[in-house]
Image (spheres, coloured by chain):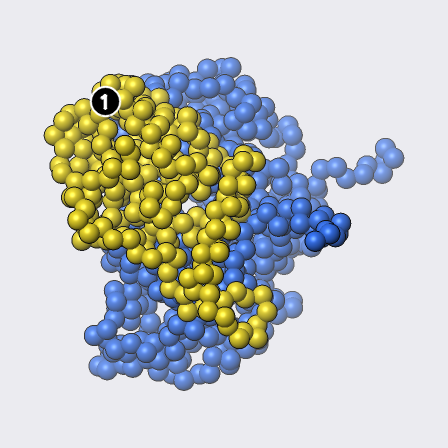
Chain colours: A blue, B yellow
Amino acid sequence: MKRSKRIEILDQRAVNKDGFIDEWPEMGFVAMHSPYDPKPSVAVENGVITELDGKKREDFDFLDQFIADYAIRTDRTETSMAIPSLEIARKIVDIQTPRKEILEIVSGITPAKMVEVINYLNVVEMMMGMQKMRARRVPGNQAHITNLKDDPVQIAADAAEGALRGFSEEETTTGVARYAPFNAIALLIGSQVGRKGVLTQCAVEEAIELELGIRGLTTYAETLSVYGTEKVFIDGDDTPYSKAFLNSAYASRGLKVRFTSGAGSEVLMGSSEKKSMLYLECRCLYVTKGAGSQGIQNGSVSCIGVAASVPAGIREVMGENLVAALLGLECASSNDQSFSNSDMRRTARTMLQFMPGTDFIFSGYAAEPNYDNMFAGSNFDAEDFDDYNVLQRDMQVDGGLRPVTEEEVIRVRREAGKAVQAVFKYLGLTEVTDEQVEAVTYAHGSKDTPKRDVASDLMAADDLMKRGITGVDVVKALAESGFEELAESILNMLKQRVIGDYMHTAAILDENFQVMSGVNTPNDYMGPGTGYRVTGKRWEEIKAIPHRINVNEF
Amino acid sequence: MEVNEQLIRAITQAVVEQLQKNGGKPQNSTVSGAQSLAGKTRMRPKHSYEGAVKAKQGTDPKEIVIGVGAAFQTEINYTIGGIPLDEVLRNVRAGIEEEGMVSRVVKVLDTSDVAFMALQCAKLSGSGIGIGIQSKGTTVIHQKDLYPLTNLELFPQAPTMDLETYRKIGRNAARYVKGEKVTPIECTNDPMVRAKFQVKAALMHIIETEQLDPEKGMIVWEGGK
């Protein structure tokens, strides 16, 4: 065939490097609705759910049983299930119906009913729903802070810059698993240099993550993964009950926790039971609620390549974010994983959460260049900071970030590096040289920094764990090395777990360590003229992007 | 990289052709933009492991067990990056031997999760160190007394792997056995890996998972020879 030049040009477009596949319900490649999804139903006898979505209690798998016993209000379920799904969908969009009324109705519906409700909503209606149902009044944002070398100095510097730029939470992970304690400590220190009150976590193997939390080297946890089928749970050596137990272990030490789930994980692990991604994710979210978690990170997350490959996949992603909000959960709405070669497509995907605002629009924006992002790349990275700031300014939307000056960036990066240097010295860990602090201060990513002695770092990290070093040791190290203010900040972060208020739904801390959550600052949106609006000081901040024409010098 | 992409395209095309041959009953679908995938429940016919020999518990303190995925060298012959699996195995084994240790290859038929594959192999091996390799190329070095989802070294991005890395994996595994101070192999990261490969990864994992035969557990695998 003689080729069309236009088609040839189109074939070369970035979007055509993405992976697309037809719907295939038998293997779970279906977003919103599978012909194998169950029909909604419920029966209650003596306060116990005896039938759920077409299944009798004796046929329940452990997810059904967990959901029936802990995630659905038995006193409300018969009333809620009697309301037509279309009517619930309309109430979600209706500005006259308050958030509280929706929460009450939804607390009695089953996962299959939830799927029906969401299928009635197009993406704009989902966004309207999210604008009303988000738990916290003011939206927030979370950063990923990682690098290819697991360089703790760079982690501290990027954390400081990220905090300065406005992120309320920062998450790290490792390239080499045994680096975890170093990464956690560096993140804890760096974050408080940039802006007091930023929460930090280290996403690693669950037992190690819990230990880091208990020791006070992190201030929240996020990667408690749940799945929509029994088989995938079992393959991970887990059950909903073990996750609930783990959740309680964090709670017992006063730490904020959220769970993680998302479309496509069951497909990727080959056990989708022919169900739609939305149905399986609804089950995950009900398990999350039933386990007593205050929130979830969802929106396909690391399986976004699968969700995005099928028709209506991105609509499903927004749909599952909305389900989280409908269940009263804090929603950290993904956008944290690269999935498209096309700048147009990746931006469009993020607008669904950016415009209405979610509790955390990204549950990890890469605050480093993507080559350093050890979650295999985020949807936005450090090179997109200015684009993002302009989007906020263009649309007068609060995306959780703010423009910064080069002087501030250099200052906080250097201070974070020096603080880590001092703490490492005080605690007898591996050496951090002045040369390294300087390199990291001015660096964009790990390509600009010197190599570290990895084997020695790992031995020191192992040793740190054996010696039982805790957050209090970090405070002491800082205080006795001349970083009193920073020491005070980290001590204040540790105090949060004694106060406990930041375990409330969708809690973040302001620079005075005051909690802002869905409890004390709930979302009160009810149409035009209500809810959170970008005004005053915050609007002035958003306006002040760099590279504005200076009329006086024109 | 160019060669790899061509290979992958060739593999994908072969997969699609096979798909259509297997399940391609013509469908009178009125929906455009949908292939005839409806009703299809498998990627590949089930391989029989009739007469396979169960792998034994190792006793040699120099031994490292390499556990390969259920579809390895049977349904799948190339990693997701297009590297022949024969070569992958040859290089991991060569790396182990270069450091004076001994390798043994088993096929893991009771799980396709690479962390659990590697941990089971670590427990089976005389040294307590094991390597798990999925058919798509994802690899873990594990030690018998670690939590399942942690590891000594993990190589999560199979598309970025080359044969030299597989050889280094063998070498490093051997160095862990010897109790040396080991410098982990440098991480590689392609931030666009998900966009390019995740759907293919899902299809390959389905092929692997549907070949599981939990009754058989871990079996002696000659594919490494």
In this orientation, does residue A477 appear?
A: no
Q: Is residue A425 above or below residue A399?
A: above
In this orientation, does residue B223 appear?
A: yes
Q: Position of residue B141 (x, y in %)?
A: 30, 33
Q: Nearer the viewer, residue A454 or B182?
A: B182
Could you tell me which secondary element the residue under label 1 belongs to? loop
Instruction: Report in which chain the residue with disc 1 lies.
Output: B
The residue that disc 1 covers is B101
Q: Residues within 10 Å of mark 1 (few under 14, many from 20)?
A: many
**Quadrant in which residue A352 is drawn:** bottom right
Instruction: Identify the residue at horizontal 51%, vertical 80% (top origin).
Output: A86
Q: Nearer the viewer, residue A531 or B50?
A: B50
Q: Position of residue A474 (x, y in %)?
A: 36, 29
Q: Nearer the viewer, residue A193 or A80?
A: A80
Number of numbered discs on residues: 1
Q: Is residue A149 left or right of residue B72?
A: right
Q: Position of residue A391 (x, y in %)?
A: 67, 49
Q: Is residue A34 left or right of residue B184?
A: right
Which quadrant does the C terminus of chain A fall into?
top right
Q: Is residue B127 left or right of residue A334?
A: left
Q: Nearer the viewer, residue A273 or A114?
A: A273
Instruction: Identify the residue at horizontal 29%, vertical 34% (top origin).
Output: B224
Instruction: Identify the residue at horizontal 44%, vertical 83% (top origin).
Output: A83
Q: Is residue B122 left or right of residue A360?
A: left
Q: Is residue A22 above or below residue B214?
A: below
**Three-letter code for the amino acid on which mark 1 is drawn:** Met
Q: Position of residue A304 (x, y in %)?
A: 49, 52
